[in-house]
Amino acid sequence: MLSLSTNDIQLRQSAADKQEAIKALATGLEQQGLVETGYVNGMLARENQNSTFLGNGIAIPHGTTDTRGLVKQTGVRVHHFPQGVDWGDGKTAYLAIGIAAKSDEHLGILKQLTKVLSSDGVEVKLQQSNSADELIKILNGESQLEADFDPTLVQQDFPATDLVQLIAVAAGLIKNREAAGNASVADAIASGATYLGQGLWLAKTDKDVTRTSLSFVTAQVPFVEQGNPVKGLLMVAACNGSHINNINYLTQLLYKQQADKLFAADADKVVTLLTQELVEGNSEIFKIRNPHGLHARPGAMLVSVAKKFESNILVANLNGDGKAVNAKSLMKVIALGVKQGHELEFTANGADADQALQAIGQAIADGLGEGK
């Protein structure tokens, strides 16, 4: 786990270009005693090989393998650029994280950082941050960026005969997690639920909520209320906007007339359906053989191959948490924490899905720019 302190962060920085920004980061790493003089050359050389811009206004400059010998201790230096720095190709970085890593330790750092930084909406939060403590909370995942939702917040086959019972159970699940209080339960029941179609209802509250959370409850026997069928209910208790992605995933299911998937799935699958993009199609599994896993350079190569195709492509690390992410997002791919020997499952849907999977498999077999 990466430990950050206010001494690692410099606010309100400015730089004419990314080279100047990288040199400033290297100086900071050297002053912190993390690297020896000359490490900056490796950072600049690495940038020339492939951009370290990840997306969402974030860049992660780091040295080449040839300069690892100049690293005294693994660590980072964070520079905040509220006005932004041109990182090339029309991309602007508001946060640059200089990384000093002696070996594969940087993969753990990247995984921790990108899991936080890949969350939608974080770019604005980072750009507008005005204190080191606030940035640390975001980078350490202490600032909520994703709604709480796991199998313990799913109750299936509840013997309800009306909506009030379903709402009470759903609100109770969130209250029991100490994410909301009694006022939240009362408000949800008083507000009622909205029919979304296909037997699914939505209840929500913003009263007495301390962490944005979702819960899902299904009826043991479907019934009718207000002239509409009741099969299940989704509850949203919100104190911020971290549930927006979940609502988007739900919208996908409803648009595709696939709400029944929620009612037929087990608790784990329900969570999956509401926490990641839905793509059904052809799948292939490939093993990563790169000695240092999918760090920025091979990760960027993989994403570049995926972006050549119009198909929707998801990738899951079968040796990680198994959650599928967009294979065309570098941040999300790196956040998978892929090491040598890990197996990745790619799922593609679209007219060129077969070609996409074939090209991805070949690129991985060829070493993703690092040789076989």
Image (spheres, rainbow, N blue to C red):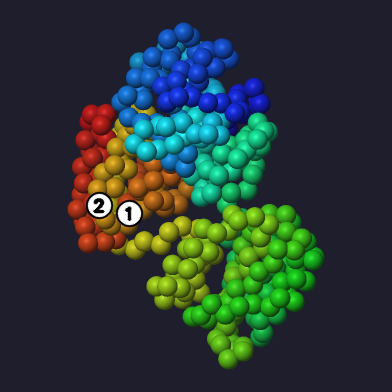
Residue farthest toward the bottom in the current orientation of the protein: 227
Residue 203: quadrant of the picture:
bottom right
Q: List the residue tagged with mark 2.
A: 309
Marks 2 and 1, Cα distance to the nearest angstrom? 9 Å
- Looking at the image, which residue is at 60% across and 40% down? 128
Residue farthest toward the right in the current orientation of the protein: 182
Where does the image place residue 281, in percent across and percent down from the top left? 30, 62
* Foreground of the two, 235 or 41: 41
Q: Are marks 2 and 1 in contact (CB under 8 Å)?
A: yes
Secondary element type, mark 1: strand
* Foreground of the two, 137 or 200: 137
Q: Is residue 194 left or right of residue 209?
A: left
**In the rendered image, the vertical position of residue 89 relative to residue 153, given as above or below:** above
- Looking at the image, which residue is at 32% across and 24% down? 48
Q: List the residue tagged with mark 1.
A: 313
Secondary element type, mark 2: loop
Quadrant assignment for the C terminus? top left
Where does the image place residue 212, in percent across and percent down from the top left? 65, 57
Q: Is residue 42 left or right of residue 135?
A: left
**Tag 2: residue type?**
Phe
Where does the image place residue 49, in percent across and percent down from the top left? 31, 26
- Looking at the image, which residue is at 21% across and 57% down? 352
